[in-house]
Image: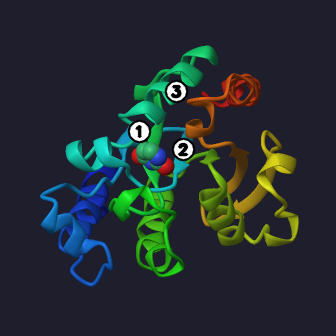
Amino acid sequence: MIKNRTELLRKIKEEVIALKESPLYAERIKNKVFPVIGEGSHNSQIMFVGEAPGKNEAATGRPFCGASGRILDELLASAQIKRTDVYVTNIVKDRPPFNRDPLPEEIVVYGPFLDRQIEIIQPKVIATLGRFSMDYVMRKFGLENLLQSISKIHGKVFEAGTSYGKIKIVPLYHPAVAVYNASSKDELKKDFQILKEFK
Ligand code: URA
């Protein structure tokens, strides 16, 4: 039987909830918080991939629902994109303590879940938020030779092949950079205009 997208995504959620081998599992249990799997349209053309949940996200189980999330909402609105029409997730599904950067071994554990989410949702565009997701997604699609610092390649559109056809990858700054920096927010707003044509 061919399973539908929602069922396949639910399976990912169940597996992450039970992921005792994750280096962040003990933290999750100790802090009585939740993993953050992803949220949005299961038929979306656009997938946003952030880094890892922060405090608000782990408390609620929802991606980008704190300060960075408010910026993301503003950026989406500036491009007339509805948040409910896109899918938002992270590479790492549990909160790293003190919001530190994800460790390579954490990306190794959680990356395959993101790979499956991409295969299930089959977005036409993946917009990466921040350097960790840029690095992971570009390498995953064989674009490592085109990787440069995010300040050089943010807002550029890269093409890659997937099992389900061509995809575009757009590296973007992480919305957190705009929390205290108005000029980064302007850059982000400009970059978000690129996504309009895919909605
Ligand atoms: N930052 C991220 O990278 N992801 C979230 O879900 C929230 C903040």
Disc on res. 64: 1
- Residue 134 lies, with reference to residue 180, above or below; the image says below
Q: 125 left or right of 73?
A: right
Label 3 secondary element: helix
x and y, in percent, of residue 180 in the image: 60, 29
Residue type at the position of mark 1:
Phe
x and y, in percent, of residue 33 in the image: 18, 55
Label 2 secondary element: strand
In the figure, residue 186 lies in which quadrant? top right
Q: Which residue is mark 2?
A: 48
Residue type at the position of mark 3:
Ile
x and y, in percent, of residue 9 in the image: 31, 56
Is the CB–ligand 1 distance for label 2 below 8 Å? no
- Visible residue check, residue 29: yes
x and y, in percent, of residue 96 in the image: 38, 63
- The answer to the question of whether label 2 and label 1 lie on touching residues, with beta carbons closer than 8 A, is yes
